Amino acid sequence: MTTSPPRDGARPILDMNAFDPATTGSAAVQRRLSNFGAASVLFYRQPIEMVSAKGAWMTAKDGTRYLDFYNNVPSVGHSHPKVAQAVAEQIQKINIHTRYIVPIVDTYIEALKSHLPEPLSNIAMTCSGSEANDLAIRVAQAATGGQGIIVTETAYHGNTGLVTEVSPSSLKRGSLPPHVIAVPPPSRHHYGSEIAKGFRTSVETALAEFARRGIRPAALLVDSIFSSDGIFADPPGFLTDAVATIRAAGGLFIADEVQPGFGRTGEAFWGFERHGIIPDLVTMGKPMGNGFPMAALAARPEYLDRFCADVGYFNTFGGNPVAAAAGLAVLEVIRDEALQANARTIGALLQDGLREIAAVDARVSDVRGAGLFIGIDLSDEHSGRPDPDLTVRVMDAMRQQAVLIGAAGRYGATLKVRPPLCLNEAEAAQFITCFKTALSR
């Protein structure tokens, strides 16, 4: 259990292969830095200026076409025509807040609810996953009367003030506040083969520490595929015991589906479904609008009732009709193009190919995940220790072959594979070939 960000060689995720502002960049880079200042986050030491994107591909200003294995926001494919058309048509009709009734908003919410467990019948629309997680924490604290939040040690849940406090991976210095405790993620490194038992024990230890501090627990908050921690999906069901433990202590379970949701894991529409549990609160965002900014909190009505009795909630842009049109189009594309099934099929092909590489190259120390959300651990072939320097070299070598990919995990030594759900067999094979080449450089 940790109460502060790890510093034993750990690397903040946004620092992995990031542009060094001290170096000389192009005029476009300098323009960005002058506008964004210290808040600028650019990928690669030589940033790419993009001009267009379609399907699983992005095109740079110099004409290079990049196979995108990094961006999980345009999940049904970059610039999907059905989403673009829905947005264009709706914005020409009406786009206003939810204090007026515009039928497409309720049509969308009902379509979204058809993918959720029945108890989660109330939806609060927001504009970002950060807002959704911020609201979920506030609802959990109001519903339970507690303040304590349990997260994992390299978690990222957003960037509002409240949510940054429960995002250890965001903190470059300092400690987590007393009401937040970070526990090790559900990995074999920490728990061996007893993932469910070990993770439950970590939650129990955190609860005991809260008791020592005189803090009542409010929630266990996890990204249900633990993407920032390095991607831990298996075995299915390992979350069940930990969820039962937090509920027995009077807290709630918040499933952060901002990254694993909307069919990405292949086997289920939501990450929590793989564990056979019904959360108390579910947050979602990123792929929800395929690039149009929208997010939401799904809640059991009794919890939202308690929160709204004291504070209430309204979001000017959350749930606007254009967002609803984008979201409805995304759900229809996932259904009509069988993208959840495609994630399962193509994801299995990718994992098979990656495991073949791992069988002959000790530097690929683990391959794990579900559907089109896969983690590839890279390690020193002699010591077996995580090798973030190798990870950066591989990312650079992949970029040289026009493939985009990012990193995750405590040490930044896990390649995070999350291409658009429309990825096809040829594109998956191209990735495998490029990865082999990158390891040989």
Image: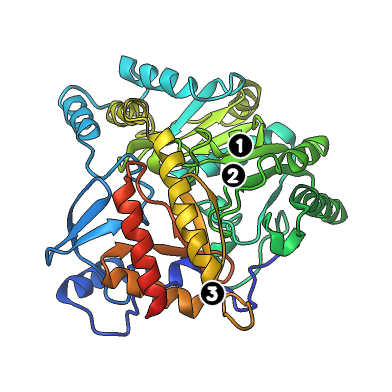
Q: Residue at x 65, y 56 (%)?
A: 152
Secondary structure at badge 2 equals loop
Q: Earlier in the sequence, mark 2 or mark 3?
A: 2
Which numbered disc covers residue 131? none
**Residue 183's x, y, as percent?**
72, 58
Q: Is residue 271 left or right of residue 391?
A: right
Mark pair 2, 3: CA separation: 27 Å
The numbered mark at residue 363 is 3
Mark 1: few, some, or many residues within 10 Å (few <14, many ≥20)?
many
Position of 393 with respect to 410 (left or right) is left
Residue nearest the observer in this picture, 111 or 337: 337
Return the x and y of residue 271 as percentages of the image width and height.
Answer: 56, 39
Residue at mark 1:
274
Task: Establish if 382 lies above or below 273.
Answer: below
- On residue 224, which mark appears? 2
- Report x, y in % for residue 409: 56, 64
